[in-house]
Image (spheres, rainbow, N blue to C red):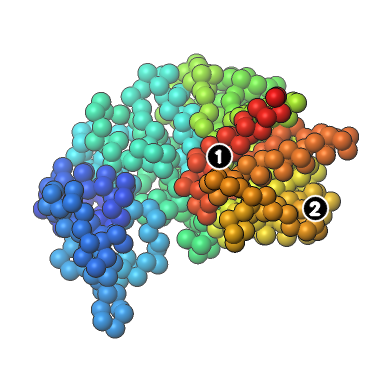
Amino acid sequence: MPADVAAPLTLDGARVLVAGARATGLAVLNLLADQGATVTMLDTKFVDGATDPELSARGVATVGPDAFIFDDGAVRAPSDTDLIVVSPGFRPDDPLLVASAEAGIPVWGDVELAWRVDRAGLYGEPRTWLVITGTNGKTTTTSMAEAIGDTAGLAVAACGNIGLTVVDALRADPRADVLCVEMSSFQLHWAPSIRPTAGLVLNVAADHLDWHGSFDAYAHAKQRALLGDVAIVGLDDDVASRLPVGDGSRRVGFTAGTPSAGEFGVIEGILVDRAFAGAPVPLIAADRVRPVGPSGLADALAAAALMRAAGVSADAVERGLAGFTPGAHRGQVVADIDGVVFVDDSKATNPHAAHAAIAAFDRVVLIAGGLLKGAAVDDLVTANADRLAGIVAIGTDRQIILDAIGRHAPKVPAVTVFTGDDGSVMTQRTGDDTSAITATGANGADAVMAQAVSAAWQLAEADARGGRGADAVLLAPAAASLDMFAGYGVRGDSFAAASAALADARRR
């Protein structure tokens, strides 16, 4: 199995171990089956000889990680294996992957496999790849880019971390000639060969440090998006703006301020292109961009730069952005009580994204918490202390948030909501005794969210009585959801249902 991406790629007859038998692994299996490879699927669900009837019916062998462990506990590389393809969640320090690399077995991510297969022309002429990454805003920017491409009449597909895997995009009919590839830091780590037509890094803030091991390693993974023909960086972000680009890459920046030559930015309320034309080219009025707020504006500038790098006209950029509707859980207004909007930004799964969500409002009551994944929230609290009318902390790492409030914004009212040992939902205001609110017959997580929404509304009412008045009750958790919910979408749905129920109750 060749390691050089320029060398001929032959998968027919290759013996491939696919690590991960969930959605990504199954998509990889289908592509490898197309190409005549012999595949073995590795997953924790196959421990102790457990099998999968559907895979068995296809003649696919299955193994658990225990198959590669010696009696003394040492991990050995798989024998008779030409290639390992890993799903994004596998960490770089996984003992099996380390042992395999040391034994000379190539280890590729699913996107690396897709890139090499596409470059080799195994599914027709190679596509145009446009790569999008960043700590937050990736999905909105990718969706905006796809909308612009559709408007321009391109055969375009959003894929990667956004839902459709890249390997499925290669196999899809009708064919997509332009791939808008949202890539996580995990996927970029496992895809060192990618050199896109254009790639962009929106922003870089502490996230997934438990996976990468350090902030520098995380930032280095993001920087891999900038090794292609055009490298686009967010100039308003301290880290992204300083990332090195590839040898021979054309560097293009975007900013919410006035752009210099070679940049995208805003002049007199109009998004403009000063990179791909001699004079500033107007694109769209800033007040027509959705979602509203600084993060939505940055995403629109980035998407515009990406698609202009791909040769799309300014007119198509305007029409694509004007018709764009943000996806669910990205700043959606789900209820309104007496002029206070209830906003679902459950997709804000890290402090950087939560900061961007808060910045869209003058004053908010924030519902936050979950799994912080090693990220600190001190800067988030410090930067937004004057905007916070109150905070409701939920989830496993709620105390970290409350401690940060105590250190940096002690005057901000804080409430925590959690499930007691007996299953009842408990609320506690900072400095107060705990009070129990029984949630009979309710799902525990939904009951916690319902009480969090109620407590947030009470804080908003108190803020109004104090003479200020919050604009919004905002779910921007700054944390992952899997401690309580099946995903950020489920968490957002729970918030939306609780907010609507509260609004209905107040109308009665």
Q: Is residue 382 visible?
A: no
Residue farthest bottom in this picture: 72
Q: Which residue is mark 1?
A: 494
Q: Position of residue 77 (x, y in %)?
A: 24, 70
Say what amino acid the circle numbered 1 marks.
Ser
Whole-angstrom CA distance, mark 1 to mark 2, is 28 Å
Q: In the rendered view, tell whether residue 370 sits above or below residue 155.
A: below
Q: Which residue is mark 2?
A: 409
Residue farthest front in this picture: 440
Of the 4 image quadrants, the one containing the N terminus is: bottom left
* In the foreground, 493 or 400: 493
Residue plotted at (67% across, 40% down) = 453
Quarter residue 311 falls in: top left
Horizontally, residue 102 falls left or right of residue 91, namely: left
Q: Earlier in the sequence, mark 1 or mark 2?
A: 2
Q: Position of residue 231 (x, y in %)?
A: 48, 41
* In the foreground, 27 or 5: 27
Residue plotted at (50% across, 41% down) = 490
Of the 4 image quadrants, the one containing the C terminus is: top right
Q: Is residue 434 visible?
A: yes
Residue 465 is tagged as none
Residue plotted at (58% across, 34% down) = 496
Callout 1: SS:
helix
